[in-house]
Image (cartoon, rainbow, N blue to C red):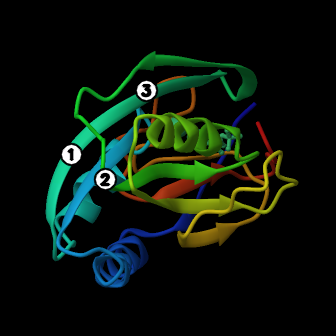
Amino acid sequence: MNQKVEVLIDRERIERRVRELGEEISGHFSGNVVVISILKGAFIFTADLVRNLKLDAEVDFIRLKSYTGSKKGELRLTYRPETDLKGKEVLIVDDIFDTGESLEFAYREVLSAGAKKVKTCVLLDKEVEKRTELRPDFVGFKIPDYFVFGYGLDLNETFRGLPYIAYFEGVKNG
Ligand code: IMP
Ligand code: MG
């Protein structure tokens, strides 16, 4: 089947919103922050976001694997941050808040590592039923229930390098 790629959020809108998020988030921290980026999907968003923070930001990663293709699989932790988070102010960054299980998993990890303050930021929030009470503190865009890719998000490891968020026309949720 020939599927047409549709742009959901273009490069300019992403850039503008990431700048705004940078401003907004900066006001919620006292000067230092450890940014924990959830791999792999959040790597591009994180790179742009940290350059818009008016804070002294240390960056580390956590790696959760939750997808096989576009279908949801089992959630696994495959890399834990090496930074000592005890007593630190932490911002967790993810690409997309879908069921919410990944963000909640990362949130619990960071809290149990002794962080004194934890805030969460996602570029996208999909309008679907959540499987957690946790809600992100900062959201870039709310989007409909489409499987999206680009700007770090993948479809079977492809399309991460697209400078915009896209979806396949007529394809809802993979
Ligand atoms: P959650 O645990 O259900 O909230 O899923 C969040 C994770 O699943 C994100 O960090 C993404 O890596 C992945 N994910 C969820 N929806 C999409 C999508 O539409 N495109 C690409 N990845 C997605
Ligand atoms: Mg992810």
Q: Residues within 10 Å of mark 1 (few under 14, many from 20)?
A: some
Residue at 31%, 84% (x, y): give it.
27
| Residue highlighted by disc 2 | 46
| Residue highlighted by disc 3 | 63
Residue at 24%, 35% (x, y): give it.
84
Q: Which mark is residue 20?
A: none
Q: Are marks 1 and 2 in contact (CB under 8 Å)?
A: yes
The quarter of the displayed image where residue 50 is located? bottom left
| Residue highlighted by disc 1 | 59
Q: Nearer the viewer, mark 1 or mark 2?
A: 1
Query: Considering only order in the chain, which callout, 3 or 2, is on the residue closer to the N terminus?
Result: 2
Residue 20: horizontal and vertical position, in percent? 35, 84
| Spatial separation of the CA atoms under disc 1 and disc 2 | 9 Å
The residue lying toward the viewer, choosing from 141 and 63, is 63
Mark 3: amino acid: Arg
| Spatial separation of the CA atoms under disc 3 and disc 1 | 13 Å
Q: Residues within 10 Å of mark 2 (few under 14, many from 20)?
A: many
Residue at 23%, 75% (x, y): give it.
30
Query: Considering only order in the chain, which callout, 2 or 1, is on the residue closer to the N terminus?
Result: 2
The secondary structure type at the circle numbered 1 is: strand
Q: Residues within 10 Å of mark 3 (few under 14, many from 20)?
A: some
The secondary structure type at the circle numbered 3 is: strand
The quarter of the displayed image where residue 86 is located? top left
Residue 13: horizontal and vertical position, in percent? 42, 78
| Spatial separation of the CA atoms under disc 2 and disc 3 | 14 Å
Mark 1: amino acid: Val
The secondary structure type at the circle numbered 2 is: helix
